[in-house]
Image (cartoon, rainbow, N blue to C red):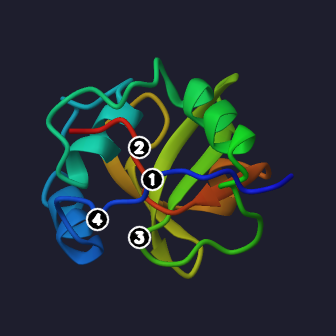
């Protein structure tokens, strides 16, 4: 699939600040069932992402050839299947991710324990404000 012209802007929060924001919320159940919103907020976007859910985001990213396979670098968004739907977390590197991972609080985990089916993308929120 050919990469389409997608405007690219710097996120309001850089990778390390976004990861620190997430790690400060470990154990919080306030983000349960809102993994996409959690990631958008982590990278500094207060407004809606323009995507209905993580499945909608993956379809858009796929259409624009922005999804990658293999080990996700630190700060990448990792899109995976769990509990019969697509979810998103942020890579800590070395196969570890952070976010509201299943249906519980914000936590860290080994991605291979969560899913055998994942792809990753740069932390890109093209409709974020």
As helix, strand or loop, the secondary structure at mark 3 comes to loop
**Residue 115 image position (x, y, % from top left):** 71, 48
Kindly indicate whether the residue at mark 2 contacts the one at mark 1 (C-beta within 8 angstroms).
Answer: yes
**Farthest top residue?**
52
Few, some or many residues within 10 Å of mark 1 (<14, 14–19, 20+): few
Which element type, helix, strand or loop, lies under badge 2? loop
Q: Which of 88 and 23 lies nearest the eye of the viewer? A: 88
Q: Residue at x 36, y 35 (%)?
A: 127
Q: Position of residue 4 (x, y in %)?
A: 68, 51
**Tag in front: 1 or 4:** 1
Q: Nearer the viewer, residue 46 or 105?
A: 46
Q: Residues within 10 Å of mark 3 (few under 14, many from 20)?
A: many
Q: CA distance from mark 3 to mark 1?
A: 19 Å
Residue 31: percent from the left, percent from the top?
26, 31
Tag 4 residue:
10
Q: Nearer the viewer, residue 8 or 108?
A: 8
* Mark in front: 3 vs 4: 4
Disc number at residue 75?
3
Q: Is residue 12 visible?
A: yes
Decide: is 34 above or below 70: above
**How far apart in space, not on screen, are marks 1 and 2 (Cα)?**
7 Å
Identity of the residue drawn at 45% across and 77% down: 74
- Chain-order first, disc 4 or disc 2: 4
Query: Under tag 4, what secondary structure?
Result: loop
Q: Residue at (76%, 71%) from the top-left corner?
A: 70
The dot on residue 126 is 2
* Quadrant of res 21: bottom left
Q: CA distance from mark 3 to mark 4?
A: 13 Å
- Crowd around label 4: few <14 · some 14–19 · many ≥20 (10 Å): few
Q: Say the numbered circle drawn on residue 7.
A: 1
């Amino acid at each position: 699939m050919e990469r389409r012209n997608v405007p690219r802007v710097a996120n309001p929060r850089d990778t390390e600040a976004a990861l620190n924001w997430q790690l400060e919320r470990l154990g919080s159940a306030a983000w349960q069932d809102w993994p996409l919103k959690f990631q958008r907020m982590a990278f500094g976007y207060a407004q809606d992402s323009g995507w209905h859910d993580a499945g909608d985001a993956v379809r858009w990213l796929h259409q624009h050839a922005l999804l990658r396979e293999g080990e996700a670098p630190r700060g990448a968004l990792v899109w995976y299947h769990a509990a019969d739907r697509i979810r998103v977390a942020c890579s800590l590197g070395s196969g570890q991710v952070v976010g509201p991972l299943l249906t519980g609080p914000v936590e860290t985990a080994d991605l291979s324990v969560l899913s055998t089916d994942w792809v990753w993308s740069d932390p890109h929120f093209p409709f974020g404000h």
